[in-house]
Amino acid sequence: MENQIKTTTLNFLSKLEINNNRDWFNENKNLYVEAQQNFITVVDDIIQGISNFDSSVQKLEAKNCVFRIYKDTRFSKDKTPYKTNMGASLAEKGTKTLSHAGYYIHLQPGESFLAGGVYMTETVNLKLIRQKISDESEEFLNILNNKNFKKNLELRGDRLVKVPQGFDKEDPMADYLKYKQFTVFHQLTDDDVLDKKFVEKAVKIFKEIYPFNQFLNEALS
């Protein structure tokens, strides 16, 4: 039987958003520990499901993929000490992955989503991805135009105003070459997250993301 996200996990995150301070957090540490363990257990099930079609995640453990809830506030105007979401990066190096396309789970009341692709990476990697999109435009468009992909996923990311240096401004793929992040998103409602079949549905979405990730990782390899 698959594990599922508990209502208490979303409730903890909702309460944390209202009480984002160390005193409240320390008094309710037991609620955090319970919510975190629930999330880790579900992420482990999702990793197991993804490993059936993507061998790159087979050795991952959820505990190495889940981001810390403690914020680094040194360079931020917002000095609240805790994130009000739980997130997990399912890629070759877990939370430390920068140069490999992977899968991402974001849990936050009213704002949860599943995602995939490359979010923040070095300039040299962006150039490799853009070059592959330019050279293999038909394959890239076939992935984006797949019926299920179009139905369930949206390509998003910051974009340049102009086509990046080194690429023809008349390139038929010019609009895609302007992207600074190559990420696809699937929004989730709270009902989606709390559904008994959440793991199964998440794995299904990630399977649709797999060809997109594969394309990006071929560029980066």
Image (tube, grey):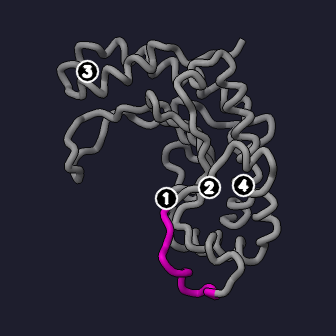
Real-space CA distance between mark 3 and mark 1, rounded to the nearest whole angstrom:
30 Å
Q: Residue at x 52, y 67 (%)?
A: 180
User: Residue 34, how many percent across, how many down?
Assistant: 43, 14
Location of residue 94 in the rendering, given as x and y in whole percent from the top left corner? 55, 43
Give the structural element (helix, strand or loop) at label 4: helix
Residue tagged 2: 155
In the picture, which quadrant includes the C terminus? bottom right
Q: Is residue 170 above or below residue 201?
A: below
Mark earlier in primary sequence (1, 4): 1
Name the front one of labels 3 and 2. 2
Contact? badges 1 and 4 (CB < 8 Å): no
Residue 212: give its label: 4
Residues under labels 3 and 4: Cα distance? 39 Å
Q: Amino acid at mark 1?
A: Met
Image spot of residue 186 (x, y percent): 61, 41
Q: CA distance from mark 3 to mark 2?
A: 36 Å
* Residue 196 in sight here: yes
The residue indicated by pointer 1 is 120
Residue 53 within the segment the image draws in magenta = no
Residue 67's place in the image compared with 35, above or below, is: below
In the rendered image, the quadrant that contains the N terminus is: top right
Query: Please, what secondary structure does the residue beneath circle 1 have?
Result: loop
Q: Give me the residue at 48% from left, 76% from top.
A: 161
Q: Amino acid at mark 4?
A: Phe
> Which stretch did the figure color magenta?
158-169
Q: Categorize mark 3 by other alpha carbons within 10 Å: few (<14), some (14-19), many (20+).
A: some
Q: Quadrant of residue 86?
A: top left
| Residue that badge 3 annotates | 25
The residue drawn where x is 23% and y is 13% is 27
| Left or right, residue 145 beside residue 154 | right
